[in-house]
Amino acid sequence: MNRLLPALAIASALAQTACAGEPTWKFRPGQTFSWECRSEFHFAQFQLLRPSSPADPPPGEMVRNAPPPPPLTQEELDRLWAEQDARIARDWTEQEKLQLDRIRRRELRDAIATENDPVRRAALEALLKKEGYITTREIRALHVDPQWETVTLQALVTAIGDDGAARIAFTVQAVRIETRFDDSGAHAIWDSAKSPTTELAGFKRYEAVLGHRFEAVIGADGEIRELAGADWPAAAPARTAKVDEREALAANVTHAPTPARAWLDMIFTLTPSGEDAWERSVEIPDAEILSLRADSPEQVAGYNCVRAKAKSRDRKHIVAVPRGSDVGDIALRMCRETAKTGHSWFSPKSGCMVKAELKASTESGGTSIIFGDFEMTIELKDRGFTELHPSPSTGTR
């Protein structure tokens, strides 16, 4: 028996009047959608040292295109840094120090101009702004850890309410996760399109997401009215198998899969209201309120869209640095707590969200600097219809 709450039918006329002219979802039974949901997380950490370097000769002794020196142990580097400090303090004039500093800043600007990674570029820019002399050894440890997560979410509209609300069945069709450490070369990747399972214990959480099914009731205005079964399953234990040590290292520090509710908020809750400005409560992934306002129309992927600008209402760009020793975890928590900005693109003609994106960037201060950059994006990849088979349990609330 198809069960629709009477309250939806009673409110239908009021909803149609209140939503007149507003961009709304145009749900139809049997309608299908496919969204690619992506997150990208970067963090960097470096510690400023004394303005000295064992590899910094006096300006008159600079040699270009010299062969790289043999690798040194940390103990050898510490000894050389100390010796260089003493030599600079004893022998270098202020003019020589200034000349070398100019060379370093020019090289730093050249590096910034060609750097594509936004977090590494931000770290270099912060170093360029540092007061005092700059040397190449001031970056003692730079860790850039890009993580790319992609979840393909398929949606099937199984029932429609009197006011246009829909009961939708979701299935995770595909998952791809990649983590890389630039400084050590540790790198791990798993793509369900190439293999349905992974031997990497750190990626088992993502393997558990593949094929997961859940349901939601979504209003024509994009409100998530009901959500069932959306928690990701627990990861199965990894088999005892020989894996590459550096792959395992990268996989083990990968953040947990983005919650399904966060992806649904990106797809549905950012739907424009038809007003000049409005607010929405979201969980992306923590609970907060986004302020949105109408922007200029724009065509995206062949759809004529209503674009909206979004930003956190109460979050600040400067946040307290969480306690902990895991730099990646600290940077991720900083990104979750800081203000977010972004856009959404909704197609009134097709009645669906075509694209949405939100980004959070933050940094800590002090002698040890941590940068964090987190971006979430959803994009419509396909839509169509399929034949539905009647079920006594389908309906909306």
Image (tube, rainbow, N blue to C red):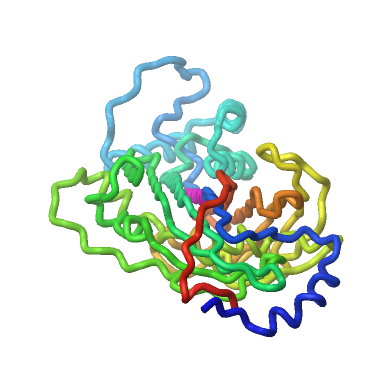
Quadrant where the C terminus is found in the figure:
bottom right
Lateral position of residue 16 relative to residue 347, left or right: right
Q: Residue at x 27, y 45 (%)?
A: 247
In terms of depth relative to the viewer, which is nearer, 181 or 325? 181
Image coordinates of residue 71 in percent, x first then y, are: 28, 31
Q: Is residue 350 above or below residue 318?
A: above
Which quadrant holds residue 232? bottom left
Image coordinates of residue 291 in percent, x first then y, are: 75, 65
Image coordinates of residue 383 in percent, x first then y, are: 58, 47
Lateral position of residue 120 relative to residue 350, left or right: left
Q: Is residue 338 above or below residue 86?
A: below
Q: Is residue 281 above or below residue 117?
A: below
Residue 93: in sight, yes or no?
no
In terms of depth relative to the viewer, which is nearer, 214 or 17? 17
Does the magenta-highlighted stretch encompass residue 390?
Answer: no
Instruction: State which region is magenta.
Output: 37-47
Residue 230: in sight, yes or no?
yes
Q: Residue at x 55, y 57 (%)?
A: 30
Which quadrant holds residue 27? bottom right
In terms of depth relative to the viewer, which is nearer, 175 or 110? 175
Does the magenta-highlighted stretch encompass residue 39?
Answer: yes
Lateral position of residue 289 relative to residue 214, left or right: right
Image coordinates of residue 165 in percent, x first then y, are: 66, 69
In terms of depth relative to the viewer, which is nearer, 309 or 254? 309
Q: Residue at x 64, y 62 (%)?
A: 268
